[in-house]
Amino acid sequence: MQFPSALDLVLSALEKIRETTDRLPHASRAALLRLQSIELETGRVRPGAPSKADLLAPIRERVCVCTKCPHLARSRTQTVFGVGNPDADLMFIGEAPGVDEDLQGEPFVGRAGQLLTKIIKAMGFAREEVYITNILKCRPDMPAGSFGNRVPTPIEMQTCRPYLVEQIEVIQPKVVVALGAVAVEGLLGVRGTMRDLRGRWHTYNQTPLMITYHPAYLLRNQAPSEKRKVWEDMLQVLERLEQPITDKQRNYFL
Ligand code: SF4
């Protein structure tokens, strides 16, 4: 179907919703900006239209000054928005910044992050080629004098989730990878065990979603069998992205 006629269908469906319900159709800022950047006649992106990086910048600015969770806004060193290529085909989503990420302002830079970077490289990508972010953009606060990181609460995740939804809408990755059960709960609102969730395809708004263990789990559980499970999940991701897979990659972690 041609883009202009597809757009006509969408507009008339939205018109019908407006006429028949009390609730006005909602479109995010990012979705509207992307629509405005498309030439109606051809369906192509207009020359000079904002890039995905341009569209992410105002979201990042809102996150930077966000105080929707006052306790986290008070305790954070800085917000941690996301890092990588805004045009990436592959997006990794974790749960929340830890102490290292809070200090550096970048997701997945601690020990778990270094392992994630290693996995990304083994897949044949540079860290800069994919996009990495978290459900929560602020580090979950810890009682004074205590160390380590805590899991975000469901309310904190629900409060921050709209920023992630906008990031995904702008980036439009071909595949999303959710790292760990907390990321799955934040993204899909479902609770489950990793045994049930990982290793098979799910969808997030029609985007293929692979669920795998958080790298921090692999640091706690060094069994080669667990590493291999994550790697098998990543092989499925490579296949979905139609990336060539070498024999060395197939045998990795075996
Ligand atoms: S966690 Fe998210 S919603 Fe809460 S203050 Fe930080 S940026 Fe805002």
Image (cartoon, grey):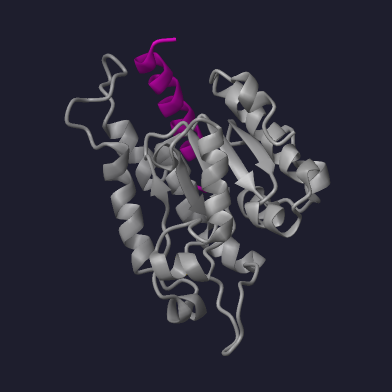
Left or right of 140 on screen, residue 41: left
Residue at the location (64% across, 52% down)?
215
Instruction: Give the quadrant of the N terminus.
Output: top left
Residue 191 lies, in percent from the top left, at 76, 53
Q: Which range of residues does the magenta coloring cover?
A: 1-23
Residue 32 lies, in percent from the top left, at 34, 39
Left or right of 203 on screen, residue 70: left
Tag count in the figure? 0
Residue 74 lies, in percent from the top left, at 44, 81
Residue at the location (28% across, 14% down)?
42
Q: Which of 121 and 24 is in front in this view?
A: 121
Q: Nearer the viewer, residue 204 or 7?
A: 204
Residue 79 lies, in percent from the top left, at 41, 66
From this view, report whether residue 193 is shown above or below residue 40: below
**Most extreme residue toward the bottom, as rendered?**
145
Left or right of 197 on screen, residue 134: left
Quarter where residue 39 is shown:
top left
Instruction: Give the quadrant of the C terminus.
Output: top right
Quarter where residue 41 is shown:
top left
Q: Nearer the viewer, residue 249 or 152?
A: 249
Residue at the location (43% across, 46% down)?
167
Residue 21 colored magenta?
Answer: yes
| Residue 23 visible somewhere in the drawing | yes
Residue at the location (66% across, 52% down)?
214
Q: Look at the magenta stretch and give its main secondary structure.
A: helix
From this view, report whether residue 10 is shown above or below residue 52: above
Residue 173 colored magenta?
Answer: no
Q: Nearer the viewer, residue 108 or 91?
A: 108
From this view, report whether residue 36 is shown above or below residue 145: above
